[in-house]
Image (cartoon, rainbow, N blue to C red):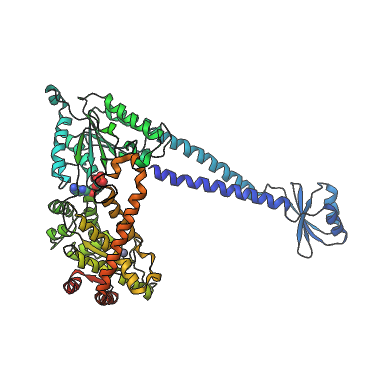
Amino acid sequence: MNKQKKNYIIIPIITSILSLGILLFSSVNFNTKNNKSYNTFKSDLELNQVLKVALSNNPYMTIYLKDGTSYKTDNPNSPTLKEELLSKNISINENNNINVTKTFAGLLLLGSIITLVFMSTNKSKGMSSATSIELTDFSEDSSKALSFKDVAGNEEAKESLKEIVDFLSNPEKYKSYGARMPKGVILYGDPGTGKTLLAKAVAGEAKVPFYALSGSDFVQVYVGVGAARIRNLFKKARSHGKAVIFIDEIDAIGKNRDGGKTAGGNDERDQTLNALLTEMSGFGESEGVIVMAATNRLDILDQALLRPGRFDRHIEVALPDVSAREKIINLHLSNKPHIDLNIKDIAKKTSYFSGAKLENLINEAAILAAKDNSECITETHIDKAYSIVLAGHEKLERSHLKASDLLLTSYHEVGHALTSLLLLPEDEVSKISIIPTTKGAGGYTLTIPEDTNYQRADYLKKKIMVMLGGRAAEEIIFGKEKITTGASSDLNNATNIAMGMISEYGMGETLGLLKLSSLGSMASGYSTKVIEECKDLINSLYDDTLKLLNNNKELLEKFSIELLEKETLKKEEIDIWKKLC
Ligand code: ADP
Ligand code: ZN
């Protein structure tokens, strides 16, 4: 709603600039262009050069000569001039109307300014009443209410939240036992794992209104606005009696104050955070208001938020495992026609997919089925959707592709695939393609990683080698001078893993078992050494990758040629190469 208003405000801004432009242009044009002195006009008159004179009630008149040129000169405004002209058979054009263009532009400008003023006052009114608060009142319309049935998997999280629902439904019961119920619950876990969904389900199950706000709404607002919004939110919620208040991305306001990167104060964030803490300690335990917050990372939150009486209940919402994925897929397929789908197999192929990504997968498949006018979603639609979700849509316009680009891409992608087949046979390479995608990749290699909770250090190193395999293949086949920018996102991923190993997982030398993020500002002296170590690790893994692919150069070449011919290789075709490794 707010966004739309922002877009519309552009219109009066543009019209006012335009009309101002027209006004300026027309008056400039009127006053200065081709001006000549009155004496020139007089001599032209004498020499019988004048064809026509345009008179108006402004201080200039326009003289048209017989040779086709024209100029402006001062208008003496004397009746004798008219007489003289008429007697010389010179025609007169009298135009006493006010300039039409000017009037129109003036009116337009006035109108735009009025609209602008109107719109901006309207907008600030909206701001002060905090339009960014999303309210869904499940107590009034129970048909829209979400329940725990709408959340598949996440069994542990749902179990702890059932308690909260019970508390919201009868707070008096808990009070009579003298039990102190949590005021705040933090749901933490990867994006798209269903945190918002769970919070909505709690409100739905308890049949109370759901008030939601996102921490990112507070970033870069004026000092004081954030705090006011928080107070406003709580006031509204409490006026209802019972409610669930949900704050998404709480880390935007509740980030650790002395954590490494955020040194130096941020008044606005502190004020907002303080307002939140004050509001939370302001209401009694039996009021039936519960504040739920979501974050991707619990460890970066300010300790003040996590103390008893604040967000003292922490619930992990993890990425779904195979059986949870199966449930989520089934849930999202339940309202869509489908046939012959091996759901167990889809669940297996989607390790590390979040609930949101699974929902996206099923939705893309449904769109493809609708496009095909197919009666049902089939295996083919799921397969296609799988590539779309992981790599983006394939570009339809492919005629511009240069043969040399395709050749390079096929070596690059086979570099990844071959390294993976050689080093990580338990990870499955499910598709390789040299068709560019709308996400900007020249081609892509899809692998299905082994489904485990922990990743061993040697696995991570091999994973880095797979990421470097693309660049290594380019260098082996085309030479060091011909390497391309195509490896940019690979290098990004490799750097992230290597940095994680050294700074977060205690797998490096510089920090040993210390965790960089726990050191806060004390870590500053170490950053150069950590980067050095990361660089050494990646360089030595790159050398290993070069060696590995050089030893299998024949395989690399033949494999790439097949990819170049077929453009896309499926699992069955890749498996043949796997046997040759
Ligand atoms: P988060 O708040 O953790 O980022 P959301 O709750 O916004 O994630 O999830 C986004 C969407 O993904 C949901 O609307 C839902 O369609 C789907 N989704 C995520 N997790 C689940 C789940 N466990 N069961 C069913 N759908 C899910
Ligand atoms: Zn690559």
Question: Where's ligand 2: which quadrant?
Answer: bottom left
267 over 337 or under it: above or below: above
* Residue in view at x 30 percent, y 75 percent: 564
Residue 545 image-quadrant placement: bottom left
Q: Nearer the viewer, residue 183 or 312?
A: 312
Quadrant of the drawing holding the N terminus: top left
Residue 295 placement: quadrant: top left
**53 vs 251, nearest the viewer:** 251
Q: Nearer the viewer, residue 559 or 139?
A: 559
556 lies above or below 492: below
Task: Report the side of 496 relative to 380 (left or right).
Answer: right
Identify which residue, 104 or 453, lies in the foreground.
453
- Horizontally, is 179 left or right of 541 in the view? left
Q: Residue furthest right?
A: 46
Residue 208 coordinates in the image, percent (x, y): 21, 33
Q: Residue 329: in sight, yes or no?
A: yes
**Residue at left offset 61%, top offset 50%:** 22
Residue 25, percent from left and from top: 65, 51
Image spot of residue 272 (x, y percent)? 36, 32
Asked whether residue 100 appears in the rendered view, the answer is no
> Compared to 162, does 553 lie above or below?
below
**Image position, residue 4 (x, y; %):** 40, 45
User: Which quadrant: the C terminus?
Assistant: bottom left
Which quadrant of the structure image shows residue 137?
top left
